[in-house]
Image (spheres, helix red, strand yellow):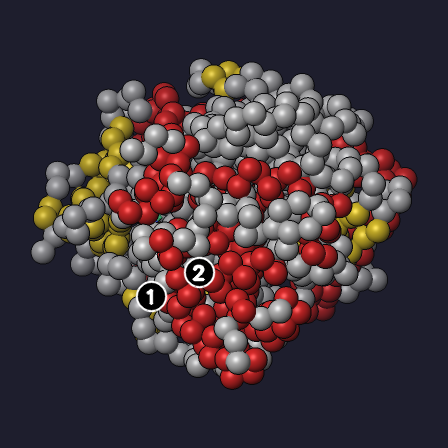
Amino acid sequence: MNHDPARRDFLRLVGVAVPASMLLCACGGHDTGSAARGVRSTAYFESGEMDFIRAATARLIPEDALGPGADKAGVPAFIDLQLAGPYGRAERWYMQGPWPSGTDSQGYQLRYTPAQIYRQAIAGIDKHCRAKYQQSFAGLKTDQQDEVLHALEGGKVDLGDLPSKTFFNLLWQNTQEGFLADPAYGGNRDFAGWKLIGFPGPRYNYVREIGEYGKPYGQPYVSLIGRVPGEALTHAGGAA
Amino acid sequence: MARRLPPVDVVLVGFGWTASIIAQELTDAGVQVLALERGAWRDTVPDFATDHIQDELRYAVRKQIFESPERETMTFRNNTSQTALPMRHLGSFLPAAGVGGAGVHWNGQCWRFLPQDFVIRTHTEQRYGKGFIPADMNLQDWGVTYEELEPHYDRFEYLCGVSGQAGNVGGQLVAGGNPFEGARARGYPLPPLERCASTVLFDKAAREVGFKPFPCPAANASRPYRNPLGVQMGQCTYCGYCEWFGCGNYSKASPQTTILPVLLKKDNFRFKTHCAVTRVNTDNTGKRATGVTYVDVDGNEWEQPAQMVVLCAFAHHNVHLLLVSKIGQPYDPVSNTGVVGRNYAYQITSSVDVFQKERLNPFMGAGALGQAVDEFNGDNFDHGPQGFVGGGYIALWNTGGRPILQHYLPEKAPKWGAGWKKAMHENYLTACSIATHGSVMSYRSSYLDLDPTWRDAYGNPLLRLTFDFQPNELKMSGFLTDKAAQIGRAIPGATVHEKKRGGPYSIVPYQTTHNTGGAVMGNDPKTSVVNRYLQSWDVPNLWVMGSSVFPQNAGYNPTGTVGALTYWSAAAMKRYLKNPGPLVTT
Ligand SMILES: Cc1cc2nc3c(=O)[nH]c(=O)nc-3n(C[C@H](O)[C@H](O)[C@H](O)COP(=O)(O)OP(=O)(O)OC[C@H]3O[C@@H](n4cnc5c(N)ncnc54)[C@H](O)[C@@H]3O)c2cc1C
Ligand code: SF4
């Protein structure tokens, strides 16, 4: 059934127990917003939440002349899988109370896991958007979406006891991760992020090339789960 | 109730860099050594194999290779007027968990401290007068000199196969090396690493400004190397996944690549993993350690009796164990008395990002591939007009170009959106960053004690850190950053972004895992926990290794000095084993 070794490896790396329905869907290709088909296509997000994530990340890293943006690069699926795994559950964090608040220099002091932060924040943002624009975030025009994102970034959206800035920073951090992490994790699809900047992937021998100052590196992009079939043998990414 | 195990001669708490050295030395001396490590076993194959170790998300971002705060963390505040709060996930520093300790995932930037660093109080008073030292600065001589440590630095460098260019051999300056370094008996075991495009730019610019740049000492092997123990290392391939990762290529010096192949064959050495030591036990006089208590992976508690206990658990954990075991007088910042927890210090870093046009291919790098200048380290310059104590090096390290955490964007680049994307596209291959790496002195107000509220997974109170950058350090770091910017601006066509370090100290962004002090060495039991041989003043069969013994921190990365002190102490332990008792009497 699951004939794609890359996909299998990627599920192993993410460390998520995935429902069979999702595996079917994951094999089917890049469509992550297929809840309409009646199979659950996400590991953590509800479908409305996924709509938000797709729309928001598409504004954070938009598609343009330089190449695919976050949505096409698979960032929403990346975040979904991360939140369904040990990271989403804050398995390695110290989560013992009491929970007083502190100074910025003392760091994170909320009792929410990353997965809980997303759930609470997306619900709050939805409320905010419906009150202000009579629309969900995903239904807004892009400049309105940017307005909301700026408001979140500035700490100006009421998300209950969750500062909107905390959520924005987390979302932006996870979006960059999904765009720039190894494609093994489901984002950076077809090396979209690495092609943008010119990073060839986890290669491990530059003995010959390190002294060739100023020369482009000519080997194909690689991932921990191998090369994309049919990928060109030289990479022309980055601007230099 | 803890179950009691058969006694051993020596028990080591932790099995990282210092424990590996002590184990190798003491087993050579014929005693039975047992190392207890709280983390897992791991080795180059299969754990660091290049088909999965080069995973920035898993290791560097999610920090899966480090200590898990869920089991052990600390609380933190900037000053005593605040309530310290738990460090809920890792940030400013990254303590290790697992065999090899932080030796697995360090960069290998392997320095010696300057001769004056070890006698800093005497030296500063002589050159600038007593009044030059701020009243709240607990500046202290180490009780050991550079000359005494030189053969031990040499041993550590030859163990690791350090690649570098000597600047001073036997008092003779050698062109191309660091002209400010203390005299060394011989050169480095290996020639410097290759230079990469960005270190070449730095070198040229620094010369233009009038400084004397040199290749940084690297525990990344520039050539295949066989160390004095007969362990073979491979040539570094500049893969750029050094710090925060294990080396898949046997090129970065670590316990695994330099000592363990020999140590693990010895009949008189054993180690256990997943065993967290929770206490050092003492007899009813409190003057003799009887062994340690640890908790195994199933939560069972064991008592391991031993003739001698060596704390090799890294800076924080050594101090934590002393405090929970009630060994030595805890430090009291109000009266400035007591010793355990006193003189915590750190490193102050800043950077100058450089934007220029030449392609640099930042992903071709190595943990300790760098070019540095040392004009403003230690007392290599006249501090009189500057009005601060201390200094640091300025270096361009190219440790790698890992895309999530290692990219530099111009100050004015948009934080997200199409502008961010464009800035990433335009700068990733061509930007670089010059680092400053400054000393931090010790102060009355910087210390470690036990937290009154929060506990670790074993039920012990968390360690509490009270620390802030003081005006002396901020001034010094600002001075260094300006010098770094001067070099950056000398790079053709460069725009620079000076990122000065401001206060207050924050536990959030990663800075360095160069935490020092809390169990410092010295010649006076009123201001030190261990004597000049790293032997506890209170409990002579207890020893403390690692940077927790630094009385204050110098302007270099610590591990060269940690390694030298460990060999120095091991030599003293061998004398002690023949005739147990305090090696220094007061
Ligand atoms: C990311 C990173 C990069 C670094 N880069 C550099 C560098 O480039 N240059 C440099 O000079 N230094 C560097 N360092 C610092 C260097 O790694 C340390 O100085 C060195 O490893 C210290 O040796 P140690 O034996 O004191 O501690 P470690 O090597 O960390 O070993 C301590 C061991 O004790 C174990 N332990 C702790 N508590 C307990 C307990 N209660 N019971 C049982 N076991 C316990 C830990 O799990 C660990 O394995 C870096 C550190 C880090 C984390
Ligand atoms: S840069 Fe060199 S020493 Fe570091 S991990 Fe890669 S091969 Fe090993």
- Confirm whether residue B566 shows in the render: no
Question: At x 26% / y 59%, what residue is drawn?
Answer: B457
Indicate which disc residue A50 carries: 2
Q: Nearer the viewer, residue B40 or B409?
A: B409
Q: Quadrant of the C terminus of chain B?
A: bottom left
Place of residue B498 in the rendered image (x, y in percent of width and height, measured from the top left)? 77, 57
Report the Cα–Cα distance between label 2 and label 1.
Answer: 27 Å
Place of residue B220 in the rendered image (x, y in percent of width and height, measured from the top left)? 57, 28
Place of residue B27 in the rendered image (x, y in percent of width and height, measured from the top left)? 31, 27
Label 1 crowd bin: few (<14), some (14–19), many (20+), radius 10 Å: many
Q: Looking at the image, is B287 positioned above or below residue B200?
A: below
Give the amino acid at mark 1: Met
Give the amino acid at mark 2: Met
In the displayed structure image, the side of residue A20 where residue B508 appears, left or right: right
Q: Ligand 1 is in which quadrant of the figure?
A: top left
Q: Nearer the viewer, residue B307 or B268?
A: B268
Q: Label 1, on which residue?
A: A95
The answer to which of marks 2 and 1 sits earlier in the sequence is 2
Disc 1: residue Cβ within 8 A of ligand 1's nearest atom:
no
The chain identifier of the residue carrying mark 2 reads: A
Question: At x 24% / y 37%, what residue is drawn?
Answer: B272
The image quadrant of residue A153 is: bottom right
Question: At x 25% / y 54%, what residue is drawn?
Answer: B278
